[in-house]
Image (spheres, grey):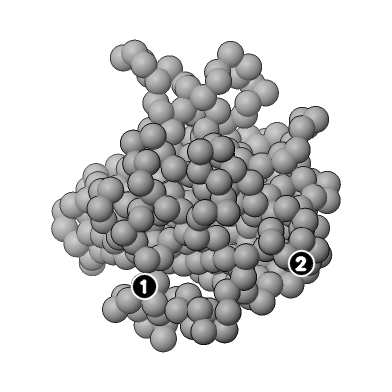
Amino acid sequence: MRRRTLLSGIAGGLVAAGATPAFAATRRVLHVRRGGSVQAAVDAVDGPGWTIVVHPGTYREVVAVPADKAELTLRGASRDPRAAVIVFDRANGTPRPEGGTYGTAGSATFTSAAPGLTVRDLTLANDWLRADHPDITGTQAVAAYVTGDRSHFENVRLLAHQDTLFADTTALDAFDRQYYRNCHIEGDVDFVFGRARAVFESCRFHTLRRDVSFTPKGMVFAPSTARANPYGFLALRGRITSGAEDGAYKIARPWVPSYETTAWPSLVVRDTWIGPGIDAAAPYTNMREAYPWQTMRFREYRNSGPGAAVTVPENRPRLTDAEAALHTRRTYLGDWRPDGCP
């Protein structure tokens, strides 16, 4: 099923038509309803601590939260994240009206640089499709580009194909923290990437079927952690599932950007069920031969499932028990306790 058809089917019939306002404000709360604009609500926020409630519907727009909208909460009115969908369709190589192209970060449907951001119970999607644009070679199409310290996503669906979630930092030397819990993140190529210090707890990472003849067909993670940052991506107590054939995907490859060649990508996957879609014999690969994955900070610990089988030990670097004690939510997030988590 094509992405755009799928998304319109999820939310399009859930909101009754009526003369409800685009958004209404009471007690530092803005309500966005069908026919309204989430970006207009963001623009109306005039200080820290506001909440924007997005009612069921599909909102086809680009949403950007600037750094001065601190401590903002953006949440769906329903606990079902499928009910309220923010979606747009542009890619790295999509031409800008004023000339040039959007680039990877500029392709994002949702962008936030605000510290203390909380997003709950929503779907953020980029439904740009390669097949519809054979003339475009820059096929990265980001659903969410997130920077800013203490960014918290809970019960959020992040949907795209290549480069779904760009978990980044505000500056090359910043160690901004992000926390994702009970989220569904899907894509095909490098669909969780960036240099943030990010914890993914009880999240599902789902690899999509691709109609291509080559393997690997994609990778879940592509961290670009700064060398000075002791922690990069931590995935714990989650699942890696697949809509593709067995062994078609890798867990990760390291991303060392041309603008930050000192990066030392870091990824720990622990206590996670890894399905057969992951190549168990060779779960990691290189992005560039100059930066082999074996020299990166890639580790696993107590994973299960057919994709976690250790058939070639040198291809499955693992933490010792003592090392695993340093790779927890608390060590990664430091003094920040999202929602009072211990």
Asked whether, in this view, residue 273 is left or right of residue 164, the answer is right
Q: Depth check: give the residue in front, 322 or 223.
A: 322
Residue drawn at 62 percent across, 70 percent down: 318
Q: Considering depth in this image, is 228 or 91 the residue closer to the camera?
A: 228
Q: Position of residue 88 (x, y in %)?
A: 49, 35
Residue holding disc 2: 310
Residue 135 lies in quadrant? top right
Q: Nearer the viewer, residue 7 or 298?
A: 298
The answer to whether residue 51 is visible is no
Residue type at tag 2: Val
Classify 10 Å Cα crowding around label 2: few (below 14), some (14-19), many (20 and above).
some
Which residue is found at the position 25% from the left and 53% from the top? 173
Q: Position of residue 38 (x, y in %)?
A: 37, 46
Q: Position of residue 290 (x, y in %)?
A: 51, 38
| Amino acid, disc 1 | Leu
Classify the position of the N terminus by image quarter.
top right
**Residue of label 1:** 333
Q: Residue at x 83, y 51 (%)?
A: 246
The quarter in which the C terminus is drawn is bottom left
Percent x, y for residue 163? 53, 41
In the displayed structure, 219 sits above or below 296; it is above
Crowd tier of the residue under label 1, counting other residues whose Cα lies within 10 Å: few below 14, some 14–19, many 20 or above: many
Residue at image coords 57%, 50%: 293
Tag 1's secondary structure? helix
Q: Nearer the viewer, mark 1 or mark 2?
A: 2
